Image: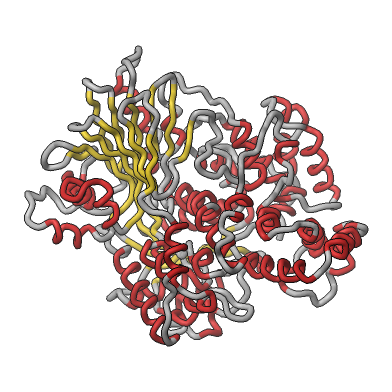
């Protein structure tokens, strides 16, 4: 894995372009600590900077920027094209200099053209390609958005990079906050593509090529792959056959996807949570390995958040070389000061903390780690798919006035009172934690009139972020996206496609990329092999969801390796107890960031709504942990400074004693 950055200058300023490129590269050193390189074309003002994490071809022949054999193209490439050996054979005899996938990528582009080569690539990638002959710059991001790529204009100069911290090194960069993007962040806990927290900077959408013919020209964006098109084609050509036959087909495709991602010239392992997705990946790895696969799990002493015991049992059954680390609350708190720099723009999914901890653990032993991300979105694994389907079926049968009356009745009793009253009852698992707050969330959904509106409510933290962010006008959100998927027959498939095109790249994959690359660890996601995505959308829904369980077909494959009793249990997620921490050990830190003076300093927030939520959190009247975590992560990001280098910082001042 690597970091890329570059620019196309209109005219040279006071600083030498190579000095600028060096600074941009240094800002990405954590993504590529093994090698560095720059390229500058004085005749055009095009510059490329590269930082390398050596994974395939550790020799100098893998150095970048790399030029094609003819000299027409120069590339900087972040990611892996896993089927490069197959492509090398298809390309025939060549004067190969080394055995890197980057060299194969260039040869493929020369032979088949950029789009033709992309259709053949199996992998994750973000790269910049300079065409010397056509004097055009191409930026490319992989199909699912596994690897990041930002771009934009600074004083008439075109700039791009894997992370914003490199763009910040370009002369004249101004950290002007995009208030509309901030409103989106306050709603979702992340800034969705193509938006960026800074004005005039954007994220390249997954599956797209950006082409620039001149530095001040309007970029041309062209899709080379579309999840929506894949879903439409899949629906039109559903797979039909016996269950065992279809299970076998997916099994073989998964084996191939995992096998390709086990190719590396460095030590390799896998994250193992003990859930369906990671257990399936590890099982398929171990089945194709002649020695025990290295697996990594972190555990928590708070049992409600702990999956380590399940992961250990699965590792023991499969015979992996397993490493587990039980982390203390202080271990987690010590990560928090690193988050603003790690994520570049504000990001508030609390599972960012354990994701970084498990990445740090794995990096002590391996350079590459496989993960199980993508299984929920492709095979119907999230509880919210069941909630959405059940609630919408209920609302279609119940008259609107009755539903609104039910919502009104729920709101008559405070969440705190409901928590106390219902807490001792034998409630369903989904209501055991904070039932009052969840019932109030249900009340909000009961008055909504479309599946898209209900799904937006599920994702929403601040329900009206434009009233919290001064001067903001919130751009279209996933409600509009989901509305456009009304050609799908089921609400569950509508939600899954919405997640595949929004939540997955903008939250899950962003989280994994930054958390792993912060410690120079390459994370690979075999379930997001585009062949699996295409196969999954050909499957009728009953292969994904049967009865009250999701991921039915994945479970059938996993059962071939692991007894059902080891994996059949309620989904836990990768959580941390943010609510208790805010009222306890993080209280002093939070109060400082959410003080009226701190909130007023940026001139971005309405102070009243945030202070009200904070005071209710402290009193125990409501649990606003996720809304407040959004505000806190933004305030911490602002306080850290946009261009602060990623480094160990002073620990957070903790109030009170650590929770048990």
Q: Quadrant of the C terminus?
A: bottom right
Q: Nearer the viewer, residue 365 or 43?
A: 43
Give the image location of residue 181, x and y in percent: 59, 37
Residue at 79% of width from left, 42% of height from top?
614
The correct choice, above or below, for 541 with respect to 16 in the image is: below
Count of numbered badges drawn on the protein: 0
- Tell me where residue 450 sits by quadrant: bottom right
- Tell me where residue 393 sits by quadrant: bottom right
Q: Is the image coloured rainbow, by chain, by secondary structure, or in one colour?
A: secondary structure
- Tell me where residue 636 sits by quadrant: top right
Would residue 72 appear left or right of 20 to someone viewing this image?
A: left
Residue 89 visible in the picture: yes
Give the image location of residue 410, x and y in percent: 88, 61
The correct choice, above or below, for 460 with respect to 181 in the image is: below
Please, which residue is most extreme toward the top here?
14
Give the image location of residue 543, x and y in percent: 50, 78
The correct choice, above or below, for 485 with respect to 148 in the image is: below
Give the image location of residue 36, x and y in percent: 28, 37
Would residue 430 appear left or right of 96 to someone viewing this image?
A: right
Residue at 33% of width from left, 57% of height from top?
123
Residue at 27% of width from left, 62% of height from top?
263
Would residue 432 appear left or right of 223 to someone viewing this image?
A: right
Residue 317 visible in the picture: no
Q: Nearer the viewer, residue 317 or 573?
A: 573
Q: Nearer the viewer, residue 418 or 180?
A: 180
């Amino acid at each position: 894995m690597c970091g890329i950055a570059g620019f196309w200058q209109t005219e040279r300023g006071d600083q030498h372009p190579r000095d600028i490129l060096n600074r941009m590269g240094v800002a990405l050193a954590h993504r590529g600590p093994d090698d560095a390189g720059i390229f500058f074309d004085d005749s055009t003002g095009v510059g490329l900077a590269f930082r390398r994490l050596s994974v395939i071809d550790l020799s100098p022949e893998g150095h970048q920027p790399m030029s094609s054999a003819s000299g027409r193209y120069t590339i900087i490439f972040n990611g892996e094209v896993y089927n490069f050996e197959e492509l090398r054979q298809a390309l025939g005899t060549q004067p190969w200099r080394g055995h890197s996938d980057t060299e194969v990528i260039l040869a493929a582009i020369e032979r088949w053209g950029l789009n033709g080569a992309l259709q053949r690539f199996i992998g994750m990638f973000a790269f910049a390609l300079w065409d010397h002959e056509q004097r055009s710059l191409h930026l490319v991001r992989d199909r699912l958005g596994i690897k990041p790529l930002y771009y934009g204009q600074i004083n008439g100069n075109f700039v791009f990079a894997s992370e914003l911290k490199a763009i910040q090194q370009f002369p004249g960069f101004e950290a002007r906050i995009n208030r509309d993007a901030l409103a989106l962040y306050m709603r979702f806990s992340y800034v969705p593509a193509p938006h960026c927290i800074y004005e005039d900077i954007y994220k390249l959408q997954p599956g797209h090529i950006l082409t620039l013919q001149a530095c001040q020209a309007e970029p041309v964006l062209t899709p080379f792959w579309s999840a929506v098109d894949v879903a439409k084609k899949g629906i039109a050509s559903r797979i039909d056959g016996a269950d065992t036959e279809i299970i076998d087909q997916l099994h073989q495709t998964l084996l191939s996807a995992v096998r390709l991602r086990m190719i590396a010239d460095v030590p390799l392992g896998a994250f193992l949570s003990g859930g369906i997705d990671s257990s399936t990946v590890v099982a398929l790895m171990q089945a194709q390995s002649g020695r025990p696969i290295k697996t990594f799990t972190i555990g928590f002493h708070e049992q409600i958040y702990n999956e380590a015991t399940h992961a250990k049992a699965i590792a023991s059954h499969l015979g992996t070389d397993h490493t587990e680390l039980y982390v203390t609350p202080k271990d987690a708190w010590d990560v928090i000061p690193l988050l603003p720099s790690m994520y570049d723009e504000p990001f508030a999914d609390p599972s960012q903390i354990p994701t970084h901890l498990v990445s740090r653990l794995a990096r002590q032993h391996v350079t590459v780690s496989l993960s199980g991300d993508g299984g929920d979105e492709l095979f119907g694994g999230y509880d919210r798919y069941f909630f959405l389907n059940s609630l919408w079926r209920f609302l279609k049968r119940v008259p609107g006035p009755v539903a609104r009356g039910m919502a009104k009745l729920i709101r008559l009793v405070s969440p705190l009172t409901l928590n106390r009253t219902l807490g001792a009852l034998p409630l369903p698992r989904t209501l055991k934690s904070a039932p009052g707050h969840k019932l109030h969330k249900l009340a909000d959904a009961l008055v909504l009139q479309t599946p898209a509106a209900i799904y937006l409510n599920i994702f929403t933290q601040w329900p009206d972020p434009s009233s919290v962010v001064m001067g903001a006008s919130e751009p279209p959100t996933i409600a509009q996206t989901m509305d456009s998927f009304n050609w799908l027959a089921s609400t569950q498939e509508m939600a899954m496609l919405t997640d595949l095109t929004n939540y997955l790249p903008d939250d899950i994959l962003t989280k994994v990329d930054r958390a792993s690359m912060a410690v120079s660890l390459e994370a690979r996601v075999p379930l997001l092999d585009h062949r699996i995505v295409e196969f999954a959308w050909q499957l009728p829904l009953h292969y994904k969801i049967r009865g009250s369980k999701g991921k039915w077909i994945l479970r059938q494959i996993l059962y071939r390796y692991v007894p059902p009793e080891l994996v059949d249990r309620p989904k836990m997620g990768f959580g941390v107890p943010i609510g208790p921490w805010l009222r306890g050990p993080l209280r002093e830190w939070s109060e400082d960031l959410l003080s009226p003076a701190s909130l007023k300093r940026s001139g971005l927030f309405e102070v009243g709504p945030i202070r009200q939520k904070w005071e209710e959190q402290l009193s125990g009247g409501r649990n606003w942990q996720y809304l407040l975590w959004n505000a806190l992560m933004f305030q911490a990001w602002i306080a850290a400074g946009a261009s602060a280098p990623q480094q160990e910082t002073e620990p957070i001042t903790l109030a009170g004693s650590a929770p048990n």
